[in-house]
Image: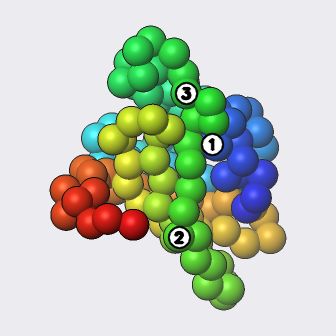
């Protein structure tokens, strides 16, 4: 699980792919279901979209995570909030995994909450 998230955090699609199971799929509401075979291309396209929002450069780190919550089970699930560093591109992810690796990831996109940004620290 850590290796999968770290691959996304650093923008290393191969690292994330190595942590997946043979039945892995990624579900994106904008592009649909992405198979394991098409995952690296999907990540590269996602990074290009992040770069477009960041003045033409892929942000580093690429993704930032917060609110990671893991529920052990068969399979285990992890939920987290993610955002492309320095942009408003963000959302949530539900990741299923077991001893074979990452089984699936399903994401949703959200916009920045205007109320949350107006609340002082």
Identify the image quadrant of the N terminus.
Answer: bottom right
The image quadrant that residue 63 belongs to is top right
Label placed on residue 8: 1
Q: Can residue 17 be seen in this view?
A: no
The crowding category of the residue bearing disc 3, from other C-alpha atoms within 10 Å (few below 14, some 14 to 19, many at least 20), is many
- Expressed as whole percent of the image width and height from the top left, the position of residue 81 reads 47, 61
| Badge 2: residue crowd in 10 Å (few <14, some 14–19, many ≥20) | few
Name the residue at 54% across, 22% down.
58
Residue 59's tag is: 3
Where's residue 79, x and y in %? 52, 70
Q: Which of 31 and 118 is in front in this view?
A: 118
**Mark 2 highlights which residue?**
67
- The C terminus lies in which quarter of the figure? bottom left
Give the Cα distance between marks 3 and 1.
12 Å
Residue appearing at x 27%, y 66% in the figure: 119
- Relative to 79, does residue 24 appear above or below in the rendering? above
């Amino acid at each position: 699980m850590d290796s999968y998230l770290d691959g996304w955090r650093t923008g290393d699609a191969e690292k994330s792919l190595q942590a997946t199971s043979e039945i892995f799929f990624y579900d994106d509401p904008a592009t649909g279901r992405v198979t394991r075979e098409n995952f690296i291309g999907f990540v590269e396209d996602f990074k290009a979209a992040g770069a477009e929002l960041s003045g033409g450069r892929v942000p580093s780190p690429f993704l930032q995570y917060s609110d990671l919550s893991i529920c052990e089970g068969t399979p285990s699930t992890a939920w987290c909030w993610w955002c492309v560093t320095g942009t408003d591109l963000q959302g949530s992810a539900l990741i299923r995994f077991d001893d074979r690796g990452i089984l699936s990831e399903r994401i949703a996109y959200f916009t920045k909450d205007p109320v949350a940004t107006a609340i002082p620290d």
